[in-house]
Structure formats: C-alpha cells, structure tokens
Image (cartoon, grey):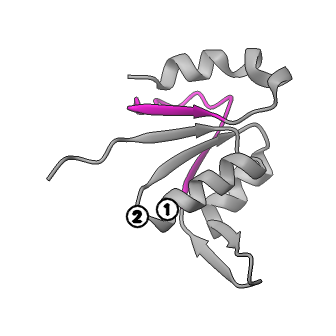
C-alpha cells in the first residue's frame, strides 16, 4: 500500500476549508494555514463544518496554524495555495518553508 502524501493548504477561507473538508471526507488529512488567529483557534477546537447541498452538516477535525507561526513546521509533499491573489506575495515565504 502506498503511503499517503502530506498536504498543506495555505489559506483557510471558503475555498481552502472546502478543499480540506472534502479531502477529510475521503480520509485524507490536511493541515491548514491562515492569518486570522481566531479562525485558527476555532478550527483546532471545533474542526471544519461542511454544509452539504441537502442542508445537512458534517464536521471534520483538522490541524491549523497561523501564517506567522515561529514554531518548527513539518514539510509537506503538496502545498495548495488558496489565498486571494493580492495576498499571494505575503505568504510565499511560508510556502517555501512548507514545501519538501
């Protein structure tokens, strides 16, 4: 059996969280990075809530970190960039820290 690739998503807005929840639904763990400390804390505490087209909801645990974290971070096989285009330049240093 092939080992699962490690995945980071930089940008935990609507798109980044949706991708993370859909991957989690398939059993693929991801780590999210976001610039809003309150959002990061809420994701670590409550997980991600995915609202489905039929109105039902599913919750998935996730790991989340702030963009500006000074802690040692793992390297990831795949880093998805899910920030607004005008935020791309500001997170490139983080992306470089995350890529294997």
First to last magenta residue range: 62-81
32 w.r.t. 89: above or below: below
Mark 2, Cα crowd under 10 Å, few <14 / some 14-19 / many 20+, is: few
Q: Is residue 53 shown left or right of residue 46?
A: right
Secondary structure at badge 2 equals: loop
* Principal secondary structure, stretch drawn in magenta: loop
Are the two marked residues, 1 and 2, in contact with CB atoms closer than 8 angstroms? yes
Mark 1, Cα crowd under 10 Å, few <14 / some 14-19 / many 20+, is: some
* Mark 1 lies on residue: 24
11 w.r.t. 53: above or below: above
Q: Position of residue 30 (x, y in %)?
A: 49, 49
Q: Position of residue 28 (x, y in %)?
A: 41, 56
Looking at the image, which residue is at 77% across and 83% down? 55
Q: Nearer the viewer, residue 29 or 93?
A: 29
Q: Which mark is residue 94?
A: none
* Mark 2 lies on residue: 27
Looking at the image, which residue is at 85% across and 21% down? 86
């Amino acid at each position: 059996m092939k080992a699962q690739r490690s995945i980071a998503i930089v940008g935990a807005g609507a798109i980044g969280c949706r991708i993370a929840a859909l991957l989690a639904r398939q059993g693929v763990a991801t780590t999210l990075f976001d610039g809003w400390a309150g959002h990061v804390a809420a994701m670590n505490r409550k997980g991600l809530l995915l609202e489905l087209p039929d109105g039902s909801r599913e919750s998935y645990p996730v790991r989340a970190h702030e963009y500006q974290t000074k802690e040692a971070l793992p390297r990831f096989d795949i880093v998805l960039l899910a920030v607004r285009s005008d935020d791309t330049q500001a997170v490139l240093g983080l992306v470089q820290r995350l890529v294997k």
